[in-house]
Amino acid sequence: MTTSEQAAVHVADERTVFAEIAGMLRAILDDVGLDDLEITRESRFTEDLDLESIDLVTLAAKLEERYGRQVNFAVFVASMELDELIDLTIGRLVDYVVQRLAAAEGC
């Protein structure tokens, strides 16, 4: 596989993970009547999507259900400072998930 093919696969994986996480977030937002919000990689969990801690717990459960225990949201956020948590973006979570899945596959 060439470097450009590897890059294309990596990008596709990021796109797939983003689409799956965006779907999870839309389901959560739909439950609180905010399903019309735009979700991008730059969207912040608290400022842009107005998610509360219980919503993040729901997201954590959905992530584990979809990706298994190698994607542990609690471990992911545990190492962050408060300002990092406040500014946490969907893209950063996507990058974490892609990294963890690649590590689990031995890439």
Image: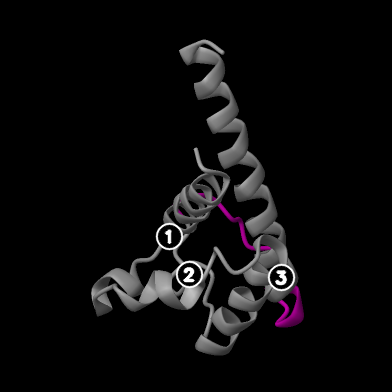
Q: How many marks?
A: 3
- Mark 2, residue position: 45
Q: Amino acid at mark 1?
A: Thr
- Mark 3, residue position: 65
Q: Amino acid at mark 2?
A: Phe
Rendered image quadrant of residue 62 = bottom right
Taking the magenta stretch, the answer to whether it contains residue 41 is: yes
Report the Cα–Cα distance between label 3 and label 1. Answer: 21 Å
Q: Look at the picture and state if 16 lies above or below 79.
A: above
86 or 7: nearer the viewer: 7
Magenta-colored segment: predominant secondary structure: loop
Q: Look at the picture and state if 90 lies above or below 57.
A: above
Q: Residue at x 44, y 64 (%)?
A: 44
85 or 73: nearer the viewer: 73
Side (left or right) of 83 relative to 5: left
Mark sitting earlier along the chain (2/1): 2
SS at mark 3? helix
User: Is the C-beta separation of discs 3 and 1 under 8 Å?
Assistant: no
Q: Residue at x 47, y 59 (%)?
A: 93
Residue 81 point in image, percent of width and height: 24, 76
Q: Which mark is residue 89?
A: 1
User: Is the C-beta separation of discs 3 and 2 under 8 Å?
Assistant: no
Taking the magenta stretch, the answer to whether it contains residue 40 is: yes
Read off the magenta span: 30-42
Binning the other alpha carbons within 10 Å of mark 1 as few (below 14), some (14 to 19) or many (20 upward) gives: many
Binning the other alpha carbons within 10 Å of mark 2 as few (below 14), some (14 to 19) or many (20 upward) gives: many
Rendered image quadrant of residue 33 = bottom right
Q: Nearer the viewer, mark 3 or mark 1?
A: 3
Q: Look at the picture and state if 94 lies above or below 53.
A: above
